[in-house]
Amino acid sequence: MVEAGKARLHVQVQGSGRPVVVLEAGIAASSLSWALVQSEIARFTCVMSYDRAGFGWSGEAPFRNRGGAAADDLALLLHNTGLPAPFILVGHSFGGLIVRIFQQRYPELVAGLVLVDPVVRAEWREMTPERAAMLARGVRLSRRGALLAKLGIVRAGLNALIGGSQRFPQLLARASAGGASSVATRFVKQVQMLPPELWPAIAGHWSEARSFQAMAANLEGLPASVAEVDEALPMRDIPVTVISAGKGNPEHAREAALSARGQLISAPEFGHWIQLDAPQLVVEAVRSMVTDY
């Protein structure tokens, strides 16, 4: 547990060597989302994962729902760990947004970026009514999840999942959260990709209302977080790898092209959670960047 701002954050460091790799999780994920990747990266360099305030084993912090605040917390966290800069930052989804803000605010600390199916900022800068409705629904369901966690309903569903029941958690979602059934189904599939020994920790984290409250805050602040990236500011001449899942997005190619040393890796056969679907793809992208450092 390391002090960072007004919260104590959980940090896990493995391996040795330089440059140090830092793993930044998605909008509602913890360090556990990197479980299939971190141990492999640790075979060839030092790698750190951590939990942002409100998630995983980390403590809560005053209301902070901006990517910029998370980037500032990360800078302080890295300083307090004493790990040597510069760092290769690996960000998944919303984590990709955080590391881009970090790269702009602290360029001297960045040796490279690996963006794993990052948030497409253009979709949130000028939201369509459909996008706005989807975001509002996500915030609403997150707050409903916090209430269900307080009532112990989430714990019951997750314990049933750990016990081998796949039907009960889905029925529970339909009965108690309406349209959240599809979200619950995806969550179940993602959890099942991780080693079973991690399931009790995941259940413990999401049985706490604070996890849902942190997710609601991050979703609510997503448009403002996107606006914190200076789109007119070109990247320095640093290596940038963007891994684009599914059908891909033209914005991912444009992101990679912002650096003279940028490259796009298309992964059409895999879904958004590439680090779970194809962890070796992420590991090899990091290995290549470490080797070229």
Image: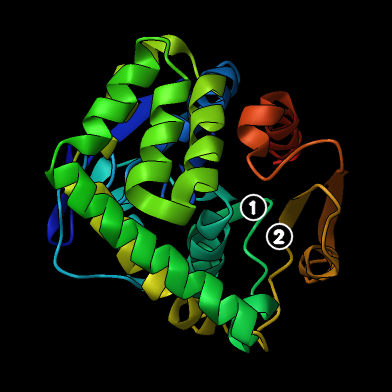
For badge 1, the amino acid type reads Gly
Q: Residue furthest front?
A: 175
Quarter that holds the C terminus: top right
Q: Is residue 267 in view from this perspective?
A: yes
Tell whether label 2 touches label 1 (CB within 8 Å).
Answer: yes
| Point 29% across, 51% down: residue | 145
Q: Secondary structure at mark 2?
A: loop
> Badge 2 local density, few (<14 within 10 Å), some, or many (20+)?
some
Vertical order, 270 against 37 (above or below) = below
Does residue 74 appear left or right of residue 232 in this picture? left
Q: Position of residue 17 (x, y in %)?
A: 52, 26
| Point 24% across, 58% down: residue | 213
Q: Position of residue 219 (x, y in %)?
A: 42, 67
Vertical order, 191 against 225 (above or below) = above
Q: Secondary structure at mark 1?
A: strand
Vertical order, 138 against 275 (above or below) = below
For badge 2, the amino acid type reads Ile
Q: Which mark is residue 238?
A: 2
